[in-house]
Image (cartoon, coloured by chain):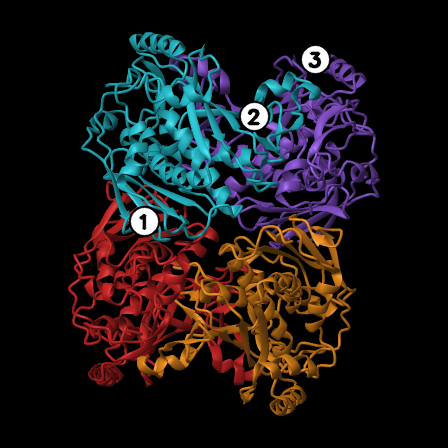
Chain colours: A purple, B cyan, C orange, D red
Amino acid sequence: MENSLGKLFTITSFGESHGRCVGVTIDGCPAGLPLTEEDIQKESDKRRPGASIASTTRAEEDKVEILSGIFNGHTTGAPICLLIWNQDADSSKYEKIRFLPRPGHADYTAFTKYGGFNDFRGGGRFSGRITATMVMAGAVAKKLLNLISIEVLSHTIDIGGIRAATTGLDEIRANVEKNPLKCADLTAAAEMARVIEQAKKAGDSIGGIIEGLALNMPVGLGEPIFDTLEGDLSKAIFAIPAVKGIEFGSGFSAAGKRGSENNDPFTITDGKIVSITNNAGGILGGISNGMPIVLRVAVKPTPSIAIKQETVDIKKRQAASLLVEGRHDSCIVPRAVPVVEAMMAVTLCDFALRAGLIPKVIK
Amino acid sequence: MENSLGKLFTITSFGESHGRCVGVTIDGCPAGLPLTEEDIQKESDKRRPGASIASTTRAEEDKVEILSGIFNGHTTGAPICLLIWNQDADSSKYEKIRFLPRPGHADYTAFTKYGGFNDFRGGGRFSGRITATMVMAGAVAKKLLNLISIEVLSHTIDIGGIRAATTGLDEIRANVEKNPLKCADLTAAAEMARVIEQAKKAGDSIGGIIEGLALNMPVGLGEPIFDTLEGDLSKAIFAIPAVKGIEFGSGFSAAGKRGSENNDPFTITDGKIVSITNNAGGILGGISNGMPIVLRVAVKPTPSIAIKQETVDIKKRQAASLLVEGRHDSCIVPRAVPVVEAMMAVTLCDFALRAGLIPKVIK
Amino acid sequence: MENSLGKLFTITSFGESHGRCVGVTIDGCPAGLPLTEEDIQKESDKRRPGASIASTTRAEEDKVEILSGIFNGHTTGAPICLLIWNQDADSSKYEKIRFLPRPGHADYTAFTKYGGFNDFRGGGRFSGRITATMVMAGAVAKKLLNLISIEVLSHTIDIGGIRAATTGLDEIRANVEKNPLKCADLTAAAEMARVIEQAKKAGDSIGGIIEGLALNMPVGLGEPIFDTLEGDLSKAIFAIPAVKGIEFGSGFSAAGKRGSENNDPFTITDGKIVSITNNAGGILGGISNGMPIVLRVAVKPTPSIAIKQETVDIKKRQAASLLVEGRHDSCIVPRAVPVVEAMMAVTLCDFALRAGLIPKVIK
Amino acid sequence: MENSLGKLFTITSFGESHGRCVGVTIDGCPAGLPLTEEDIQKESDKRRPGASIASTTRAEEDKVEILSGIFNGHTTGAPICLLIWNQDADSSKYEKIRFLPRPGHADYTAFTKYGGFNDFRGGGRFSGRITATMVMAGAVAKKLLNLISIEVLSHTIDIGGIRAATTGLDEIRANVEKNPLKCADLTAAAEMARVIEQAKKAGDSIGGIIEGLALNMPVGLGEPIFDTLEGDLSKAIFAIPAVKGIEFGSGFSAAGKRGSENNDPFTITDGKIVSITNNAGGILGGISNGMPIVLRVAVKPTPSIAIKQETVDIKKRQAASLLVEGRHDSCIVPRAVPVVEAMMAVTLCDFALRAGLIPKVIK
């Protein structure tokens, strides 16, 4: 396993879905940043199922605690350990299906890779709950990015084929936290809710697409040829369970375009070099060009469904069928929205530190 | 800059398009692997423009030399340095446009990030020529993967909206090196050639999609939660210039699917646990599940076009227009095909070493 | 700050002397290792002041808790987080001297590097208490090394110039935990106790030397040219506060020797290639040669003394004098003994994993 | 093998003693640094045997070539590859002793670790010749450190027990390159020459001690708790063959001292906080305190001697004796002096970049 990410802003995640806690240690945060548990809690709460029709009703309190790295309300330069204690969870249904890997889940690969020693309860280390550690780290990263005016946003743009209309930034800022779909287009959001409801009634689940944006980007973030902005953002975002694709700017649609259409001409606006279009998604040669970073993330339908599925008994090595008990998230896309934002923030923060844009001591 | 990639199989790339050479050092290759310059040359030649209608006619001899790490025809455990000397190139056209960044290229971001000290000739460190260093490293990785029977393949599946029909593995193996489009569907290939020819006549360029496959995968490659198979493959592949999107298995189409469609049921075939479908693209929880890895890579139209474009003079900081002289690749997709294969091989080789599947000494 | 160490067995330390806790996360531990809190506690207790005449009497209970990574009594492959909650500590004396850096301590450098935001209470992140995180990690490493029969030992060989006689391994094993000096030569130990007592009476402190041994070493640990066994062991051991020197085998005395004296002739004993002498300290070319690793570590007298010292007021930037209140360890050497052992174990464990000697799943 | 070192200033060494070349790639050097082959050659020449009585007479021309990373006389931000082509060397004597490992050399450990595939000619990757790659990298590091006024010096202080008198910095600067012993005390140097001559006549070799200094240090270099200044300097210096010990400031002698003697009182001189003594060797808590860094390195007598030695035949697995033909360096200490300097420079440069003291673009 590799549970650390980042070169200068390094996060180390630990904990399991049904273990004692989930936590994250952040190493490399400059000293002098004001930071409270409320700062983290606020971001953490965005991941909460809340009123979302799409989510399970498991009441996760998810109270964030700071274990280290803060003194007199400021970061000290020392590693910041953030923790959420798990509530007691009923693991009995997982015991029953221990040797029956759920299709689409990591059960089979984890069992095989770790010789059956993996904590399978609630998906263990492969649970969506682990994204809580990402969001906590993202909260710190966002505060640092805020110092250099970088704003990171994310929102649902597609669920089950229902595509949100293009909206302005103000609508994204205003609407995303207002509706459980985390969609800026409230009309589409209502439609998405219906699609999810349909899937739910069928005991099924549905996928979607999340868009991530980074605004007020400086020119020069990214360390090619290998630590490109696209490459490191992708790596960070693929750590989110259920992500199966990512594209930047015109992305896959660029395949059908001509260079003359896809190239973004430069111009000068208010004395600043900008591009007229942004097919590049804010990145040229793996380096930010000052335009907004625009990326889209494909999220598969959550594999947890209330429908009988074919699987195998990996102990007896014979065919079996499986019906997973209990509540299921019929659509995890909205809950993944703040996680995409968090992982973008963590990555951009690392690059900003590498570019020397954030001081070692904040005054 | 960060020019090293990989944890146990670490490649370090160096060199510039119009500098003295391009080269790569491979650290972590087990001792005892038979390796000759011909082994590398063979892979390197796949990247050569050759008869491709899509490519410039610059005659790059690209003769691979081994500078270190081989003794008596075998790897020694020491770092392997592989080098290609550059031929003399005419850099005069780049001098003329030094302060006129080409839209879609890294000229502007590199100039800004490196304070104008970057070697801009032929794109310098951001040139497609740097992918020669990736292919050389990939050649070694492929030989190592061959020891554990992993086969990596890649082929063009879309150019300018012309989509190749789905073909069998045998056709991919047989046809890719036969046609300059590197497309297994020879009928589509002919059509793709026409589309490229049209773009070329218009002084324009065209994009496409490459599919990468890894066959005979063991279960268990990948080191989540951060070093997932998807994440590290993506990071490696985004190092290839012009790549703007990547997806695994059902990828973006999963967004519109239900869980019951997208989940891959398990079954037992020939005593082996397999999945009936492969929407997961061979990866569950960031770990290989033994099914073929299937990924698709979006390649933007090469930004080099023979059409006048709007840009800015970054020295005078005023609007300007630009017409880049000389030959241009009107479609770089076919030349990127072996590079995708190489970067997949490099990444899988690193994971195979991390999983302990390749011995430290090969006997 | 960089609070992670190790390539495949990676430990990440967090916490402060007077903060809520000290903790460590271990990533890369193979799955299937039986591990209990008692396993860690046992090693942790060796660091405890106990009856040692040399140590402060602060009653540190230091109860180890496992927060993650263990399931059904075994490691799971997931990161193992180990934690000790701090007892309430009186930080008032540190408040008083906040701007008066104690000579020999990290007060001045930490204040300057972290802009005064560092948690200075009890030395904060620079306290000897942080070595508790090293010992916890070492406990896991020692269990893994035990699987391949490597034994790590350490003992006091010098305090204040009192040199222990050379003893056999059995005496080291038997005597070290028996006396508060952690010295195998019980006669010398008594003398060392007197020397410490003298220093204590004078309000002063005293330094010493610790010897570390690794037995039953396989041939081939170490990854030169940069990750040599000497280099990585040194780096790990210099993380222990107060260490100012390290040597391997004949070490500094080799400077005065001739090659014919210092070279260790090879011979065959019981069918095994061994060297007749061990001036190399078990390492040739940065790689273990199968002989015991022998290293010696210089520990400076603890800078905490009850004598008035000259310093500066870093706020007023003027000369000042300082008399630190409270109890002091008059000799920290014995408490550093298990820490040297722990850091040796952590380093060797990393190298054993890199050499492929410990399986990914323990059965 | 691990042939890369450094986090932000990363050097990757390659090549073998009797292979085609030795080389090094430097990644992370800021753009805009003026750099010529002469800059590197000048440092490289210091490693040359020259007129040294202690060294072999093999005429190594060691002409440095820059392969990449420089454009218009300045660094570009891209990786800098530096290379020295090897002259033809006679490897026949190594063929003869292929299975007879030389005591004190890496022959046995390399053979075992790399399954006999290692390039054994001239010691291959374990040859002193590999230090040429360190010195080339050090030349670049020294130019960067020069920008922030850090000066790195090293000199021989002991050979075979002949101890140099303490000299001032001016004498070190003036005398080291003047005499083949690289000793600032010219009287001691003459005596050292005699000791070496005696060893040489006896077909034997002799060891020594090198002192390294870094002057004009800023406060704050070092990233504890694991990337301490002592730890990373040690790791870098132990990469030099034959180094078996290192100490900082009062080092091993601190073991016999009291805290009141060993603590360095602070005072203010010319408005600057300094310490009156420097037993800390310029480092407190793993962080530079602004005083000169002072370290001493123990170098064992070179294991190459012209005296018959006992060894084993590792193929036949039986006792054997060995008399190595040809010339030998009877003392490698003077040739290691510039290498210590280089590795100090490389390490300090990495820390200076980490502390943000050297800009990303040099203007």
Of marks 3 and 2, which one's residue comes earlier in the chain? 3
**Amino acid on which the number 1 mark rests in the picture:** His
Between A285 and D119, the one lying in front of the other is D119
Image position of D234 (left or right of C77): left
Give percent across and percent down for residue D187: 24, 85
Disc 1 and disc 3 on one polypeptide chain: no
Residue D209, percent across and down?
35, 77
Q: Relative to residue C157, is residue A45 depicted above or below? A: above
Kindly identify which residue carries mark 2. Answer: A245
CA gap, disc 1 and disc 2: 39 Å
Q: Is residue C278 visible?
A: yes
Type of the residue with mark 3: Ala
The answer to whether residue A37 is above or below residue A249 is: below
Q: Which mark is residue B74?
A: 1
- State the residue in front, C99 or D71: D71
| Mark 1 vs mark 2: in front | 1
Residue C183's spot in the image, x, y percent?
62, 83
SS at badge 3: helix
Camera-side mark, 3 or 2: 2
Say which element carries label 2. strand
Q: Residue at x 33, y 35 (%)?
A: B125
